[in-house]
Image (cartoon, grey):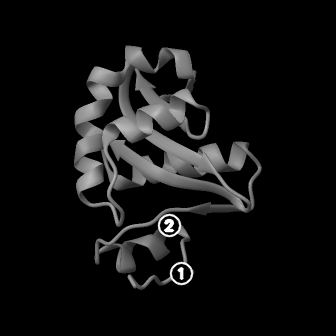
Amino acid sequence: MSSWVKALVQPEQIGQVWAWMRPKLEEVAQSSPVAWMPEDVYCEIKERRAYLWLALNENQPVAFCVMQPNKEGLHMWAGWAEWSLDGAMELAKEIATEAKVKRLTFSSLRPGWEKVAPEFGFKPIQWACEV
């Protein structure tokens, strides 16, 4: 994807993109390391505990990134793009750079990230054990 515009969705506007976004969030939730539902994302955005960014091409959404602020920067809770993974990561990194944060994080149980994440500058920093 070579030409897109980034847009922050205000909490009161999430209903305008929810029908488009919800099925994509379901896809993302299926590969998440913790259990959550698309409605959890909706509520966090409405309560301003998470922020929704869209990539728009000709005023149509083609990607999204849901970010949660934390002590060190931004945590990418969920992301999705019509085009390549490169494009989704480009969107996330642009958001983090503009927010002037020190760290951008994400979590995933997918084994493929062990190879792919370092290509985007990510390093493993946490392991977890269920007790």
Tell me the quadrant of the picture where the C terminus can be found: bottom left
* Residue 116 falls in image quadrant: bottom left
Tell me residue 44's x, y (percent). 51, 37
- In the image, which disc is placed on residue 113? none
Tell me residue 67's x, y (percent). 55, 46
Secondary structure at badge 1 equals: loop
Foreground residue among 64 and 116: 64
Q: Is residue 99 left or right of residue 121?
A: right
Tell me the quadrant of the picture where the N terminus can be found: top left
Tell me residue 47's x, y (percent). 58, 31
Foreground residue among 89 and 79: 79
Give the residue at mark 2: 120
Q: Is residue 87 above or below residue 32?
A: above
Q: CA distance from mark 1 to mark 2?
A: 17 Å
Report the mark closest to the observer, 1 or 2: 1
Q: Residue furthest front?
A: 131
For mark 1, does the 10 Å Cα neighbourhood hold few (<14), some (14 to 19), or many (20 or more) residues?
few
* Residue 125 falls in image quadrant: bottom right
Amino acid type shown at disc 2: Phe
Residue at horizontal 56%, vertical 70%?
121
Residue at horizontal 47%, vertical 42%?
65
Tell me residue 115's x, y (percent). 36, 79
- Does the rendering let one see residue 98? yes
Q: Is residue 73 above or below residue 125?
A: above
Secondary structure at badge 2 equals: helix
Give the residue at mark 1: 126
Foreground residue among 5 and 30: 30
Amino acid type shown at disc 1: Gln
* Residue 129 falls in image quadrant: bottom left
- Does the rendering let one see residue 2? no
Residue at horizontal 55%, vertical 78%?
123
